[in-house]
Amino acid sequence: MYDTAIIGGGLTGCATAWRLAEDGAKVILLERDEINSAASGANAGSLHVQIPHDPFVRLGPDWAAAFSQTLPLLLDSIDLWREVESRLGTDLEVSMTGGLLVAASEAEMRQIERKAAIERAAGVTVELLSASALKDRAPYLSGRLTGGAYCPTEGKANPLLCAPAFAKAANRLGASLLSGCEVAAIERGREGFELTTSQGLVKARRIVNAAGAASGRIAQMAGMRMDIEAFPIQLSVTAPAAPLVSHLVYAAAEKLTLKQTRAGSIIIGGGWPARLDAAGRPVVDPKALARNVKLAVDTVPGLADVELLRTWAAFVNGNADWRPIIGEAPGAPGFFMAYAPWIGFTASLATASIVADLAQGKTPQTRADLSCFAPR
Ligand SMILES: Cc1cc2nc3c(=O)[nH]c(=O)nc-3n(C[C@H](O)[C@H](O)[C@H](O)COP(=O)(O)OP(=O)(O)OC[C@H]3O[C@@H](n4cnc5c(N)ncnc54)[C@H](O)[C@@H]3O)c2cc1C
């Protein structure tokens, strides 16, 4: 009998396993494929704090006000990102050089100002920049931009390194990690839960659902309906280039994130939709790729000289209102949700830390109002 069974070997699950194992809990992590084989290993590695601009424009101020309840969670996570390398004793290529959201018109600049007011009210540091201040701070950006917003608490990490580092650290502390172990059913047992898996029956007092895009299906196994979906999105990487982009860069015009990795490659994304093939697997959409790359070159003209190497598509976990779902499920004592949509790489460390505390009956150290994220 385990204290806790964690379903999902992405960053959220692995970080939760590490936190619980650190506290001496008897933990098992069940991963249907390989550790870090889903979104946590396929993402862009951006550490976000600013409210995403695209939904801000599309969904409006009410959505932004609701989303601002997530900002304290992101700030908590950034604090954890800052200390994670020393806690784990591993280089994860974490770098906090700040994020720049840029405007290509006065209208976009007004949107950025409105968004910055909401961010500041939630405790996020955002500096509005004129065109010339933007040019001084980031001379590599297009001279046609009209201004922007700088958030010093944003950054990046290498997604290929993070979940495996947590998995290794958790394993060193005694956590059991099972790859190729798919959870197929969940029943209530006498003392907790019985999980039917592809590797046999697993018994645990508590369950942490960290299954990312499949979290809705896992919740359903425990008798709950949650509107969590898998959305195919795509991302590109260039060949290594000389130092060019020193911030996490976003554009207000359309979806864009870009950053340069320590190896010199530039990751270009922003959540452009991919397609599904006949088998339902995510595949790259060339039209979305063309628009994404054009916007990238318009924003950072020096990118025109860099070779694009590869574009890939993967499922991201999403829900329409962007609300994280974190905590013990009502009506299912002992079943904990550890879920943060769309920008779950950033949020994963705080999500894991909160859930690890809740699962042990401890009060989490967080500046977020957890009632906003309670499973419904
Ligand atoms: C292309 C792309 C770019 C992104 N860019 C960013 C970014 O720059 N910054 C950011 O903050 N976020 C980004 N995201 C989102 C982020 O990657 C995810 O929100 C986050 O990684 C989710 O982590 P997770 O550990 O909760 O889930 P996942 O990493 O999806 O892991 C869940 C795991 O559960 C396993 N699982 C599912 N069902 C079962 C089952 N029945 N039994 C056992 N195991 C199961 C899966 O195999 C998977 O390994 C991006 C996502 C994508 C796809």
Image (cartoon, grey):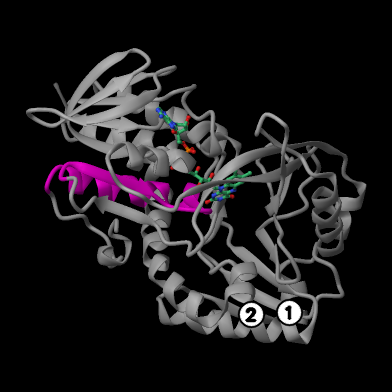
Position in image of residue 90 (x %, y %): 44, 32
How far across and how far down the image is residue 346, in percent?
48, 51
Can residue 176 be seen by looking at this rendering? no
Q: Where residue 224 appears, x then y in whole percent?
A: 30, 47
Q: Residue at x 13, y 28 (%)?
A: 189
* Identity of the residue furthest to the top in this view: 199
Q: Which residue is mark 2?
A: 112
Q: CA distance from mark 2 to mark 1?
A: 9 Å
Amino acid type, callout 2? Ile
Mark 1: amino acid: Gly
Q: Which residues are magenta?
A: 333-361
Q: Is residue 347 on the magenta stretch?
A: yes
The residue furthest right is 305
Question: In terms of depth relative to the viewer, which is nearer, 313 or 310?
Answer: 313
Left or right of residue 306, residue 358 in this image:
left
Quick check: 225 above or below 99? Answer: above
Please say whether residue 65 is one of the residues in the magenta stretch: no
Mark 1 beta carbon near ligand 1 (under 8 Å): no
Q: Is residue 50 left or right of residue 241?
A: left
Q: Quadrant of residue 256?
A: bottom right
Q: Residue at point 25% right, 65% down?
A: 371
Residue at 37%, 61% (x, y): give it. 73
Q: Nearer the viewer, mark 2 or mark 1?
A: 2
Badge 1 is on which residue? Answer: 147
Query: For residue 336, what is the image quadrant?
Result: top left
Q: Is residue 122 left or right of residue 91?
A: left
Q: Quadrant of residue 3?
A: top left
